[in-house]
Image: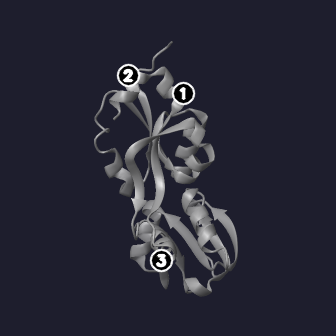
C-alpha cells in the first residue's frame, strides 16, 4: 500500500484562524492548502486534503467519511466575535431581504434557524463582490470581513450569531470540528498518529 509523505491540511484563510495552525506551520511533514471554510469543506469531501477544521454542518452531512479529532473545535460559549449579522433593523423585527456569505455553511444554516419565524428572503454573495444596497435588510459576514465591518460601525446593529444562539438555547455553539478523512487514516496510520 502506497504511503503518503505529507499530511495535506486545509487552512482557513482568515487572520483570526491563524492560532489554530501555529504549531503546524513549521512542520516538514505537512502540506498546507488555504481556502475559505466552504472551500475547505469541498476539498475534504473530494479527498484533496486529509485533515482540517471543517464546518460542523459539513460533518453532520458527511460524518461517515471522517474521524473527529478529540478536544479540538472552533466553538463559542457566548460570543464568537467573527460571525455577524449586520443590519439597520432590530433583530426581533427583522424582515425583508438578507444577503448571506458564500464562505460558510454552518453560519448560514445557523442564521436560517435563528430567522425561521421572520419574514425574510435570502440570497448568497461572495464577500469579495459584496455591494451594500438599501434594498437589503441585513448582511451575514464571517472571518476577516466580519471583523473589519464590525470596527467600521457602518450598521446600526451587529449581531453575533453565537450570542444569539446562546440567548435562545443557553448552549454553546460549535462552528467547526477538526476532522481527518477515514480513508487517509486507513492507508497512513503512522503519519496520522504524528498529527496528534
Residue nearer the viewer, 73 or 136: 73
Relative to 60, residue 96 above or below: below
Q: Earlier in the sequence, mark 1 or mark 3?
A: 3
Q: Where in the figure is residue 193, as x and y percent of width and height?
A: 36, 28
In what quadrant of the picture does the C terminus appear? top left
Q: Secondary structure at mark 1?
A: helix
Which corner quadrant of the image does residue 31 belong to?
top left
Q: CA distance from mark 1 to mark 3?
A: 39 Å
Q: Residues within 10 Å of mark 1 (few under 14, many from 20)?
A: few
> Is 13 situated left or right of 29 in this image?
right
Q: Which residue is mark 3?
A: 167
Q: Left or right? Give the position of 110 relative to 188.
A: right
Q: On screen, 166 above or below 145?
A: below
- Residue depicted at x 28% and y 35%: 26
Measure the C-alpha gap from mark 3 to mark 2.
44 Å
Left or right, 58 with reference to 34:
right
Q: Is residue 65 above or below residue 101?
A: above
The disc, 1 or 2, on the residue closer to the chain's N-terminal end is: 1
State the residue position of label 2.
190
Q: Residue 9's x, y, as percent? A: 43, 37
**Badge number at residue 183:** 1
Amino acid at each position: 500500500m502506497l504511503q503518503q509523505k505529507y499530511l495535506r491540511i486545509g487552512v482557513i484563510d482568515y487572520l483570526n484562524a491563524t492560532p489554530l495552525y501555529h504549531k503546524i506551520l513549521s512542520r516538514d511533514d505537512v502540506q498546507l492548502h488555504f481556502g475559505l471554510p466552504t472551500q475547505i469543506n469541498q476539498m475534504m469531501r473530494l479527498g484533496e486534503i486529509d485533515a482540517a477544521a471543517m464546518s460542523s454542518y459539513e460533518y453532520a452531512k458527511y460524518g461517515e467519511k471522517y474521524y473527529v479529532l478529540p478536544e479540538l473545535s472552533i466553538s463559542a460559549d457566548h460570543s464568537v466575535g467573527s460571525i455577524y449579522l449586520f443590519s439597520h433593523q432590530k433583530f426581533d423585527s427583522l424582515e425583508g431581504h438578507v444577503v448571506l456569505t458564500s464562505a460558510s455553511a454552518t453560519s448560514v444554516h445557523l442564521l436560517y434557524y435563528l430567522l425561521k419565524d421572520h419574514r425574510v428572503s435570502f440570497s448568497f454573495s461572495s464577500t469579495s463582490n459584496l455591494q451594500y444596497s438599501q434594498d437589503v435588510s441585513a448582511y451575514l459576514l464571517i472571518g476577516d470581513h466580519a471583523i473589519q465591518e464590525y470596527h467600521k460601525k457602518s450598521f446600526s446593529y451587529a449581531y453575533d450569531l453565537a450570542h444569539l444562539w446562546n440567548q435562545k438555547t443557553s448552549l454553546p455553539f460549535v462552528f467547526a470540528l477538526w476532522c481527518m478523512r477515514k480513508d487517509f487514516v486507513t492507508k497512513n496510520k503512522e503519519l496520522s498518529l504524528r498529527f496528534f
